[in-house]
Amino acid sequence: MTPSPSPSPSPSRRTDTRSPTEQATPSGAAHAELNGDLSVVVGSLHRAYDERVGATAVQAEIQQVADRFTGARIRAFVPLFVRRYAGARLRSLPATPQLASTTPGAPGRD
């Protein structure tokens, strides 16, 4: 019995020559949609926590959580995860008293 030749790749199948980073990075409309959704989450987290823990801490937490999903293949849920995980972490941080006392309209401000 003669061995059968190995099947050649189908002409309709293409090999993706992009690097893994390029493959994981959304392009075009998908990228714009993700950035738009993420910017909504970023704004929401800043509005909710800036006065309590400071804008720097909020931005650092958002960045740390978002970085965890940099190589995610499915990116549609990244804004949801950023909101959930960063929000949970920010809620667990102690309030920064000096921020509350220097906020316009805060009690104790002349």
Image: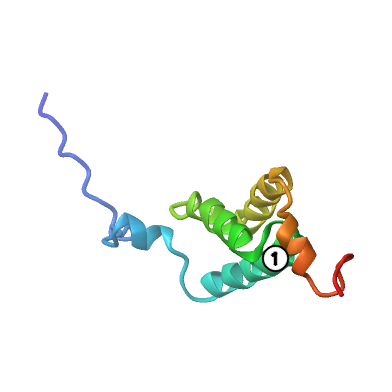
Residue 26 screen position, x and y as percent: 47, 66
Front-most of residues 99 and 60:
99
Front-most of residues 36 and 8:
36
Quarter of the figure that contains the C terminus: bottom right
Position of 16 compared to 45: left or right? left
Residue 79 screen position, x and y as percent: 64, 59
Position of 48 compared to 76: left or right? right
* Residue plotted at (68% across, 50% down): 90
Indicate whether 94 appears above or below 23. above
Residue 3 screen position, x and y as percent: 13, 30
* Residue plotted at (43% across, 63% down): 25
Position of 67 compared to 86: left or right? left
Q: Which residue is mark 1?
A: 46
* Residue plotted at (57% across, 70% down): 35
Front-most of residues 21 and 47:
47
Instruction: Look at the numbered disc 1 and give the secondary structure of its residue.
Output: helix
Indicate whether 26 appears above or below 110. above
Which residue type carries mark 1?
A: His
Examine the image and state in which quarter residue 101 appears. Answer: bottom right
Indicate whether 11 appears above or below 3. below
Examine the image and state in which quarter residue 103 appears. Answer: bottom right
Front-most of residues 10 and 60:
60
Of all residues shown, which one is farthest toward the right?
A: 107
